[in-house]
Amino acid sequence: MLSWVTLGWLGIEAGVAIAAALAAGSVALLGFGLDSGIEALASIIVIWRLTGARRTSNSAERRGQRLVAISFLILGPYIAVEALIDLASGTRPETSLVGIALTAFTAVFEPAVGMAKRRLGRALGSGTVGGEGTQNLLCAAQAAAVLAGLVTNTLFGAWWVDPAVALLIAAIALREGQRAWRGEQSSCACGCAPDPVPQPGISSPA
């Protein structure tokens, strides 16, 4: 249920963020929106992974992780190139009140969902569920960074903060893509340690 709720929200979040980013010319907000789409893919994979016989399938888990990894490894270079072009050309994003409201809500909403999934993952002995929760925490940290960039640009005209935040998002995306490809869980930018990855089909003690 948590994954379904998250999936619904992330669909809205990605769509609104990308539309607001295109309207304002914010590469950081665009990166946040595209990353939200990848996070939604992680929710779909969790739902798929925990259905039927796949609950105890090592191969299903690895296929899902590889799909997420490829998405991250495509996103990172794309956002980095866009950010570098904006820095070199001095492109100034416009104010995005929609983006500010969206990222502010995400920075508050996603940590609660992420921590709930991490607790549930430990209770179920599911590294997949716990890993999705860590992705939510990472998204919240990114939202806070994008929010800071949008507010700084709005109040002080510091246009360079937006592509700088975008470069940070690109670096995080590449790191997470590498970890997912190797089969490691994500670590969130807020300092929490990743959950241990239990073997599929083995539940932790209650």
Image (tube, rainbow, N blue to C red):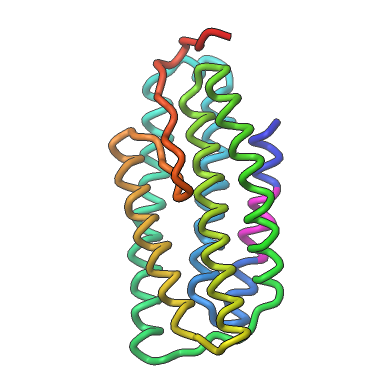
Q: Residue at x 43, y 16 (%)?
A: 200
Quick one: quadrant of the C terminus? top right
Query: Nearest the camera: 54 or 140?
Result: 140
Q: Main secondary structure of the magenta part?
A: helix
**Left or right side of 115 for 175:** left
Q: Residue at x 65, y 55 (%)?
A: 106
Picture coordinates of residue 7 (x, y %)? 65, 44
Q: Residue at x 68, y 49 (%)?
A: 109
Picture coordinates of residue 46 (x, y %)? 54, 32
- Above or below residue 96? Residue 13 is above
Picture coordinates of residue 22 (x, y %)? 58, 78
Quick one: quadrant of the N terminus? top right
Query: Nearest the camera: 77 or 92?
Result: 92
- Above or below residue 128? Residue 83 is below
Q: Residue at x 57, y 87 (%)?
A: 156
The image quarter containing residue 89 is: bottom left
**Left or right side of 190 for 17:** right
Q: Which residues are magenta?
A: 9-16
Picture coordinates of residue 150 (x, y %)? 58, 76
The image quarter containing residue 160 is: bottom left
